[in-house]
Image: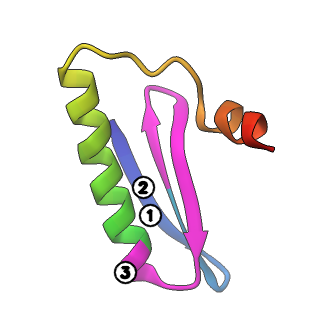
Amino acid sequence: MKGKVWKDRDTWHYIVTQGNRIIAADNTGAWRPMFDQCHTKVGAFREVARTGHHIEKTYEQLVDEIN
């Protein structure tokens, strides 16, 4: 799992990836919440992976199902 935080114009973004798949993402106007959420989610996904579970769906697939 890898996390990335970056700024695009006035908005901060983060993504968490597993290989080349995005498994979590979000954005806001503030740096600190994005950094904290990214760090927390990377840790959570790593813990899930350590227990032997696999993430089958990408972030985009989960969002599409909710909408």
Residue 25, above or below 48: below
Q: Quadrant of residue 36?
A: bottom left
Residue 21 in the image, given as x and y percentages of width and height: 54, 29
How far apart are the two marked residues, 2 and 1, measured between alpha carbons?
4 Å
Circle number at residue 54: none
Work out how far the residue at label 2 is from the one at label 3, CA to CA, in angstroms: 13 Å
- Snapshot quadrant of residue 26: bottom right
Q: Is residue 22 left or right of residue 1?
A: right
Which quarter shows the N terminus? top left
Q: What's the residue type where badge 3 is placed?
A: Arg
* Marks 2 and 3, the one that precedes in the sequence: 2
Q: Which residues are magenta?
A: 15-33
Neighbor class of circle 2 (other Cα within 10 Å; few <14, some 14-19, many 20+) is some
Q: Residue at x 31, y 46 (%)?
A: 42
Q: What is the residue that sits farthest to the right in this orientation?
A: 67
The residue to which callout 3 is attached is: 32
Do tag 2 and tag 1 residues touch (Cβ < 8 Å)? yes
Which sits earlier in the primary sequence, circle 3 or circle 1?
1
Q: Position of residue 25 (x, y in %)?
A: 55, 52
The residue tagged with tag 2: helix, strand or loop? strand
Q: In this orientation, which residue lies closer to the viewer: 5 or 39? A: 39
Q: Residues within 10 Å of mark 3 (few under 14, many from 20)?
A: few
